[in-house]
Amino acid sequence: MPIKSAVFDAYGTLFDVTAAAREAAGEPGQEALADTWQGLAATWRAKQLEYSWLRAIRGDHTDFWTVTQDALDYALEAHGLGDPALRERLAQLYWQLSAYPEVPAMLERLKARGLNTAILSNGSPGMLEGAVQSAGLDALLDAVLSVESVGIFKPAAPVYDLVNERFGGTKDEVLFVSSNGWDVSSAARYGFRTLWVNRAGLPVDRMPGTPDTIHSDLTTLEEVL
């Protein structure tokens, strides 16, 4: 079946999750962060994912912004950064994360081919709206789908159900794209065709469901079409 919809994870796939820490580290008065921003960003992201998985397993759902702030508080304490003003600045910047450089042109090419384009994300609607608008991607996306409509985080199957509920068709008409190996594995097992954006050059996860295609970024995505 031909691919009719290209659906993207948001954080780490379209938007650079390290951008908030990196940008804050370059601002005046942030010398302490400048020495540790990479470690902080890594801890923040790891805890953000961990907390979402644990909440999904425990049936203890909350919105992703709460998860993101809890992960930030953990990361700041872990790296010895207790400045409330820094915490506020990092939280603010997370609502306007930079898109990866190749993203706008890639989405434009998909739209020119007549494909449906969408985000499917753990992010809360407000967070996603802020990131999409900040990156200027509004006109390039047909839908922004959030887990908040089903009340559980990925990789729960009801999240992936949202795609065909929105666009119709069959699972094998969907190309699901994510930079998260666990997300691609889950989407592949669900029945989507998948592309793993393996920006970090990591091994494939040893889990049921393997990516159909692996690229290092989104520049050459159309090759799979």
Image (tube, rainbow, N blue to C red):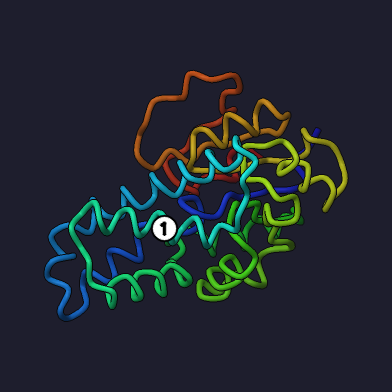
In which quadrant is the N terminus drawn? top right
Q: Quadrant of residue 79?
A: bottom left
Q: Percent from the top left, x then y, of residue 133?
A: 57, 75
Residue 197 higher or lower than 126, as above or below = above
**Mark 1 is on which residue type?**
Asp
The number of numbered discs placed on residues in the rendered structure image is 1
The image shows residue 190 at horizontal and vertical percentages of 71, 29
Residue 44 position (above or below residue 213) = below
Residue 215 shown left or right of residue 4 in the figure: left
Residue 131 picture location, percent across and down: 53, 69
Tag 1 residue:
16
Residue nearest the viewer, comparing 17 with 40: 40
For the C terminus, which image quadrant? top right
Question: Going 57% across and 23% down the picture, which residue do you hit?
Answer: 210
81 sits left or right of 218 in the view: left
Q: Nearer the viewer, residue 121 or 5?
A: 121
**Residue in the image at 22% along x and 66% along y:** 82
In this picture, residue 212 sits left or right of residue 146 = left
Which quadrant would residue 209 be assigned to in this image? top right
Where residue 161 appears, as percent x and y from the top left, is: 78, 42
Q: Nearer the viewer, residue 64 or 206?
A: 64
Q: Residue at x 35, y 75 (%)?
A: 88
Q: Is residue 24 above or below residue 99?
A: below
Q: Quadrant of residue 136?
A: bottom right
What's the residue at 65%, 29% (across, down)? 188
What kind of element bears circle 1? loop
* 2 with respect to 96 (left or right): right
Residue farthest to the right? 168
